[in-house]
Amino acid sequence: MNSFRLYFDSKKMSSSESSRLVLVTGAAGNIGKYFAEHANKQKYKLRLMVHSTHEPEKTEPLKPFGEIVQGDLDQMNALDKVCKDVHTIIHLAGDPDPSGTWDSLRKANIEGLYNIFLAAKKAGVKRMVYASSIHAITGYPKDVQVKTNEPSNPGDLYGVTKCFGEALCRYMGEKEGVPSIAIRIGAFQDHSAARSKDSIDMMDAWLSQRDCVQLLERCIDAPEDLKFAIVHGLSNNTFNRMEIDSTRRLLGYDPQDNFFEESEAFKHLSMTDELAGHNVEDDRQKSGLRDKSSEHKKNEKKK
């Protein structure tokens, strides 16, 4: 269960904190590449871990953004080396296939996560930011908005491995001294994908690129005494499969994008403005409070 607190003000970091070394695993993936390019380089030094089998065309574009290192999740010696002097790990590596089979998912998402945690503990890493997934809760009906403090409910075997990851994060954070935040990441896509006519299936799960970067940075900057948390990685969509209010409160997350203001199917409806709040703040509704004093009645008659 999450702890709730006022969010940490990253502007108050000391100068020594502003140059923390951040290891990004899976740095050649979609999220890793975008974060590497757009992360605040004044605050973080990036060490970008790529798989040993990646071709140069995948890794060369990363060079301007940090130190490139090779490492596989089943090679402990390599993991020990890449974790040296690291303050925070953003763990994005793994098998991202929702239709993945057990053999592949187990090796990358369970054994691989255990290995990177083991290396992190040995190296004295201060924070693990783990890429969980919305698939950890998609066993709930579609019309249920899931809260961070509700039980996980995976909708597929991939989601099962993410539930394991969240449990390992809690254990490592609360019992083994590696504070951890698990982000249930939704549909990470750029704005052009949200505008596509075929994008309706992510209307309640969109996470824009810039909102993702902001959330990852908020996790890096979280208070050191936050031992464990699950947060939800979605943009400020009018309707969201997972609530993000707890993430706002915990980390100061302030998402800027809304699928319903980007999608060509919904933009013309102006849903953000037109949807009724069904409360006294609506223009079409008045307060039920009435002042029954004689002075008030006189004033009403004068009107």
Image (cartoon, rainbow, N blue to C red):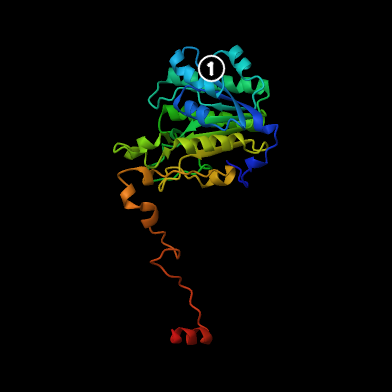
In the figure, 175 relative to 76: above or below? below
In front: 30, or 39? 39
Left or right placement of residue 4 versus residue 54 in this view: right
Can you identify the residue that label 1 sits on? 73
In front: 283, or 58? 58
Left or right placement of residue 170 versus residue 146 in this view: right
- Mark yes or no: residue 162 visible: yes
Under circle 1, the secondary element is loop
- Mark yes or no: residue 152 visible: no
Which residue corresponds to the image point at 46% horizontal and 13% vertical from the top-left? 56
Image quarter where the N terminus lies is top right
Which residue corresponds to the image point at 46% horizontal and 83% vertical from the top-left? 300
Q: In which quarter of the image is residue 167?
A: top right
Left or right placement of residue 295 versus residue 87 in this view: left
Image quarter where the C terminus lies is bottom left
Which residue corresponds to the image point at 52% horizontal and 27% vertical from the top-left? 36
Image coordinates for residue 43, horizontal then vertical, percent: 62, 32
Image coordinates for residue 162, horizontal then vertical, percent: 49, 29
Q: Residue furthest front?
A: 64
Q: What residue type is labelled 1?
A: Leu
At label 1, counting other C-alpha atoms closer than 10 Å, the crowd grade (few under 14, some 14-19, many 20 or more) is: many
In front: 256, or 90? 256
Image coordinates for residue 211, horizontal then vertical, percent: 48, 39
Which residue corresponds to the image point at 46% horizontal and 40% vertical from the top-left? 234
